Image (spheres, rainbow, N blue to C red):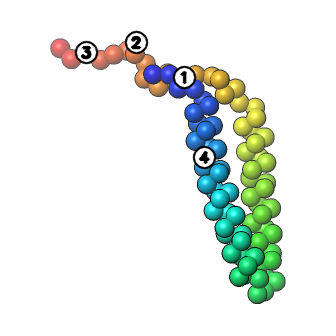
Amino acid sequence: MEITLSAFLFLYLLFIAAFLFFSFFNLFHMIRFGFVSPLAYVVTVGYIIVTLLALFISYFYIAQVDWTYTFNLFDSSSSFSIE
């Protein structure tokens, strides 16, 4: 059974999409209801900076991968036989 690396890329992109979806609502609620102290501003800006840094670093490493590469999940040449 051969699997391409692009399958893992799609799973990663789904994870990133879910993360950004929840981050949007998290930031919306922090901006709408949470700015009562200067620390809330620092936490919000820090969250945005760390998120953007993580996305940039992951893009830097993901862009270097050959996503057309396939690999065998189960090697069919070494089958077990019960006698």
Q: Dot 4, crowdedness within 10 Å: few (<14), some or many (≥20)?
A: few
Indicate the position of residue 64 as horizontal and vertical percent values.
75, 32
Residue in view at x 74 percent, y 52 percent? 54
Q: Earlier in the sequence, mark 1 or mark 3?
A: 1
| Alpha carbon distance from label 2 to label 3 | 12 Å
Q: Earlier in the sequence, mark 3 or mark 4?
A: 4
> Which residue carries the number 3 mark?
81
Q: Earlier in the sequence, mark 1 or mark 2?
A: 1
Q: Earlier in the sequence, mark 4 or mark 1?
A: 4
| Alpha carbon distance from label 4 to label 1 | 22 Å
| Alpha carbon distance from label 2 to label 4 | 34 Å
Amino acid type, residue under disc 4 in the picture: Leu
Amino acid type, residue under disc 2 in the picture: Ser
Secondary structure state at the residue bearing disc 3: loop
Q: Dot 2, crowdedness within 10 Å: few (<14), some or many (≥20)?
A: few
Reply above or below: 49 against 6. Answer: below
Between 81 and 7, the one lying in front of the other is 7
**Residue 9: quadrant of the picture:** top right
Q: What label sits on residue 14 in the rendered view?
A: 4
Reply above or below: 46 against 71. Answer: below
**Residue 5: quadrant of the picture:** top right
Q: Are marks 1 and 3 in contact (CB under 8 Å)?
A: no
Between 29 and 58, the one lying in front of the other is 29
Between 73 and 33, the one lying in front of the other is 33
